[in-house]
Image (cartoon, rainbow, N blue to C red):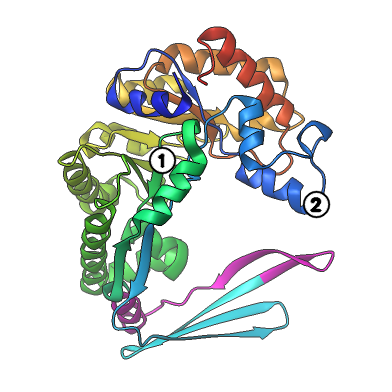
Amino acid sequence: MTRKELNLAIFEGTADRVLWQPRLETWINHHRENGTFPKRYRDMDYFEIYDALGASVRYAASAGLERYEEPADVERRSEQHDNNYISIVRTSNGEIRTVHQDIWEDGKLKNRRIVDFPVKTPEDLRVVTDLVERERFRANLETFQKAADAVGHRAEPTMFLSSSGFTELIKHQCGLPGTYYLLHDHPAAVEAYLEACDRRDDRMIDAALKLPCRIFNLGDHATNEFTPPPILKRYLLPRWQRISDRLHAHGRYVHSHWDGNSRLMLPFLLETRLDGVESLTPEPMADMTLEQIKAAVRDKMVVLDLLRAIDFLPNFPVNELLEFAKRVIDMFAPKLILGISDEISQVGEIEKVEAISELVDKICGLAE
């Protein structure tokens, strides 16, 4: 069985083994940029590294869903003031500004973080709502097929859809405190924005269903802090149910990205009607045990990842990682796509990824 066939079989419920699917992009890009690959990987390209590890890839074929704006009359410009990068967006509803702090190292831009969010008032939020209403999508079968062909036997293509409007508000528009202040003081404006995001979801899914992609991800970044139970039940749960029902009606599968502290949300997992959940992170890195996760998903949902990223750091013993990985496999297989919650870091040890490859091969055999 190929990695592609096993990837789909796990969602179909017909698998009899585990798929090893770590996300290595951050590690690969860091070492490629800095010329620090271990010697054995130095002359390999992206896919050759995965093949050397016997590992599947998750998002390399997320392509073919093109975004555009209608009408296309949004004005965008940027300004640089020392280490502050300012992006400015203007629509007929007004203007918003996002201030980023640039982090430099040895003359290279290493990071760009928001230090002043653009949305503070209902008027600001109307600009963002206007932008959401303008978003349109079209399917590009040629682009999708080219990416899927490149991935080949390594994975069933998985495509990104959108995050929830609520978590996008936190991540990109208001920040966490700002979102909750705005919701408390101006609930009608926030709910009008969220309704626009629901309509955007529908337009995106209309286009996505024109592609032969079978597995989709909602990059929600849901956590206890972002989406505690009262918020989850009111704004997230109906969205997951609606999207799941739409995709299931067309024979597709969908999972959501829950990272960080998610213990308070676990009791609602089966109500979501999602096929799986990505990146749940066990303690001590986050706030839940394997037993609590298992009680939440039972044998009904696919779980993606579960290996803690901290265990791949140099100061964590490899034997403890392997023992933990054995527990994960014993508890969750075959509804398991084993991976790292949610990525190995730049300084993670690739030798530990190799050790997990050997473990999976020993237990059930690595897919081809």
* Mark 1 or mark 2: whose residue is earlier in sequence: 2
Secondary-structure class at tag 2: helix
Name the one closer to the observer, 134 or 124: 134
User: Which residue in the protein does label 2 denote?
Assistant: 34
Residue 118 within the segment the image draws in magenta? yes
Provide residue 76's location: percent of width, then percent of height: 48, 85
Residue positioned 65% across, 72% down in the render: 101
Q: CA distance from mark 1 to mark 2?
A: 29 Å
* Depicted 118 relative to depicted 95: above or below: above
Q: Which residues are magenta?
A: 102-131
Provide residue 304's location: percent of width, then percent of height: 44, 31
Provide residue 264's location: percent of width, then percent of height: 36, 37
Provide residue 64's location: percent of width, then percent of height: 39, 56
- Quadrant hosting residue 272: top left
Left or right: residue 283 versus residue 216 is: right
Q: Give, as a three-letter code, the residue at label 2.
A: Asn
10 Å crowding of disc 1: few (<14), some (14-19), many (20+): many
* Depicted 57 relative to depicted 136: above or below: above
User: Which residue in the protein does label 1 denote?
Assistant: 157
Left or right: residue 233 versus residue 59 is: left
